Each structure stands twice: as structure tokens, then as C-alpha cells.
Amino acid sequence: MVPHLITALTGPINELEQRILESMPAIERWFRLEWMEHTPPFYTSVDVRNAGFKLAPVDTNLFPGGFNNLTPEMLPLAVQAAMAAIEKICPEAKNLLLVPEKHTRNSFYLSNVATLVRIFTQAGLNVRLGTLDPEVTEPTELLTADGGTLTVEPLQRKRGRVTLKDFDPCTILLNNDLSAGIPQVLENLHEQYLLPPLHAGWAVRRKTKHFAAYSNVAKKFAKLLGMDPWLIDPMFAAGSELNFADGTGIDALQSQVDALLTKIRRKYKEYGIQEKPFVVVKADAGTYGMGIMTVRDAKDLDALNRKTRNKMSVIKDGQEVSEVIIQEGVTTNERVNDAVAEPVVYMMDRYVVGGFYRVHAERGVDENLNAPGASFVPLAFAESSQLPKPGEKPGVSAPNRFYMYGVIARLAMLAASYELEVTDPEAEIYA
């Protein structure tokens, strides 16, 4: 099922698709060379928005849930990518400890964990689940959305290693984004591989750092293709020292929103775009679509109602918001059965393994779709993401569009790799 684009402004994107397809050998070689120097995050998902005149990532997740939304046809790709990733890190790996999120009541999330267990079991590993939840003191069965069961066990710390009862893994895979902070049990593990590293979690990571790295990657890529990097890069600014509850810092935020809207207007004028620009203000360390609001005019911030203030002031695990990213809004002009949709691309190691459309019938083209009421339509990446069909008319062929989305998502993944290098507390410093 290919969502249709409902926009007359397909000029720049059609041109971009054409250029990406024509430059495919150069693009793949460029990625190959980048991966020789940089290590991809273990797994990544990227939310992409296609406005018809601009195609850009708006969020990059280094602890992706949602593997249960990939089609069964995509699983062989994921298994192969998992094998490649594990082989690079620990070729003799036998036991893998998977640490999921604590919210065990979300049965759809647990289906995602079950899919990950399946992928890594098929990649040749013994997989068991260890939880950070202090209330779990013995092996506990949990029910997934499709009626399956999973057993989570309490983690044990033995000197420099994390184990489970009768299970000593050489690799620990986190599917928990550490929003609540870095747990003591995972600190100073020098004898085991921890993937992704602790500094990839929201206790340390910031969206502004990621999008600064992405701007850098987008400039390099745009130079390769001879195009304006703005077509694939959302502009942004950082806001700090905020307290939404009592209104501290809102004035400074207003002037930053105003400045960014002015910059976007200039770009719209340059490209003859008639739409009204907007920005999205979101928690700099946030996840799960929490702490997000759309702002079309800086004056809107004068009259924030209590509900919006409350929504913006606290995110997952009760973390308070004092830093935000103000990001250029990218509308999504894709539809599935007339509902607004955005592609989410999944990668493991440096490979695209699949994706889906996040669809929300009650949200507008300029709103966050990662909200209650969203549904998921798998993308047909399996047969097409690496195999575009040159010669097709731009904007028409699904494989070509998916290939283009895969390229943009890999740029965001490369940016995450730059970002993790810069924030690595144990990086070697060359004087």
C-alpha cells in the first residue's frame, strides 16, 4: 500500500528524487566511505516528513520500539543486519541480555520486545530479558498484544558484570532509553559490551546536539549532489532555562521562535512556497511524543493555557523540562486512506531493515503524529528499499520514494554516529 502525496508543490522533491536516483552509485560509495571512519549506532529509527517541497528527518531514536510493526517479509533483512552487527562487535557472542523498558503493561511495546527476541535468536544468540524494575524480584511472565508471553528476570550485578540467574551474557542490548537517568547496575561495565552505550540515553543525549550533527552531514551530502541542504535539513534553535509551569524564560523563547520563523519565511519566499511556516517546540531530551507543541506565531506563547503548560513541563518518567529544541516544522503531505501519515524508517547496523507509516486520523499536517490514536501501516521496504527503479517518473514509483526515505534516514543515522563520538565520555583525546 503506497500512501499518496497530496501536494502540488512536488517540484523540489521530484527533482531531489531524480537526483538521488541518478547519483545512486556515488551516494552508496559516499556512505561506504563514511562507515569506514564512523561506527553506526546499533539500531536506529527515524521519523521522516515529506512536505512535497522538503524532505527531512524530525526525530532520531537510538532505542527504537515498534519492531512489531514491521512486516514478516522484513524480518530476514533484520536478522541478516543483526548478524552483521554482532559479528563486528563480538563474533564469539553466544548469550545476549536484552533490557527492555519498565512499562510492562503496554502489551504492544512487549510485542516489539518479542520481535527483537525473535530477530536475535534467529541471528544465532541465546536471548533472555532482564529488567531494571526494582519491583521484579523473580522471573515474571508478561503478556504481549498478540497473546504471546515473555519472561523478564531481575538483573544481578557480579563485580564488573551484569548477569541473570544461570546466565552470563557477553553482550547487553538496551531497549530502554534511560530517560529516568543512568541506573547504577549498568555503570562501569568493562567486561561486557553494552549497546547502545550509556551516553546514547536521554539522561545524556540532546536533540539539539543531534540536529547540529545532522546539519553537518546534510551539508556534506548536499555538496555531493550539488543542491541546497535546506531541502533535507530542518533549521533549529535551542531554548534553555525554561519553566513552563511558572512562565520563566518564555520571553526569550518567544524571540527565538520569532527569529526562526523569519528565517523559514525567507526560504519559503526563495522557493515560492505559499504555505504558512510553523515551528515545533519539543523537550530537548524527550521521547514518546511527550512535551511537544506546534507554534505558528510567537504571540501564541503569550496565552499558553494550563493544559499546554502542564503538558510541556513534564515528560516521560516525570522528568521536568527546562531545555527545548525549537525546530522548523515540516508538514507531511502523505495520506493513508485520507489520514495524515509519516514514514518511520528502521535500521540495524548500517542497513535499512524496514519501516512503517505512522498514521493519525485526528491530527493535522503540521502536528505531531506520535500520539494516542496513532495506527501503523507497514512499508513495503523489504523488496524495494535497496532496489530503486530508475527510469520511473519521479514521485510515482513506491520503490523510488522508499529508497529516497532510506537515504534520508541513513543520513540521520550517520549524524547520530557523529553525535555519539562527540559525547563519548571515554573517547580518546589526541593532543
Image (cartoon, grey):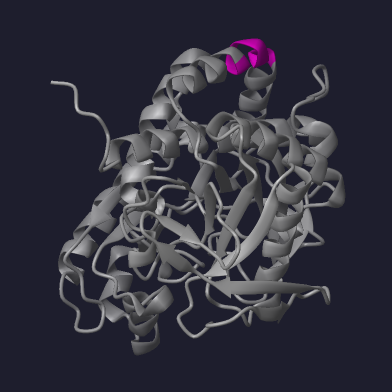
Quarter location, residue 212: top left
Residue reaching furthest to the bottom: 306
Please name the residue shown 21% across and 75% down the image. 243
Considering the whole magenta stretch, tell me its main secondary structure. Answer: helix
Q: Residue 55's spot in the image, x, y percent? A: 56, 39
Quadrant of the image for the C terminus?
A: top left
Query: Which segment is the magenta one?
Result: 22-28
Q: Residue at x 38, y 81 (%)?
A: 308
- Identify which residue is drawn at 67% across, 56% down: 127
Question: Residue 275 versus residue 216: which sits nearer the camera?
Answer: 216
Q: Which one is in front, 26 or 295?
A: 26
- Measured as percent of width and height from the top left, residue 206 is found at 33, 53
Note whether 398 is above or below 68 in the view shown: above
Q: Position of residue 113 (x, y in %)?
A: 67, 63
**Residue 408 x %, y %:** 57, 34
Q: Is residue 294 left or right of residue 431?
A: right
As drawn, which residue projects farthest toward the front? 166
Decide whether residue 62 is among the magenta residues.
no
Residue 415 image-quadrant placement: top left
- Counting every numbered tag in the picture gives 0
Q: Is residue 276 above or below residue 307?
A: above
318 vs 221, nearest the viewer: 318
Whether residue 21 can be seen here? yes
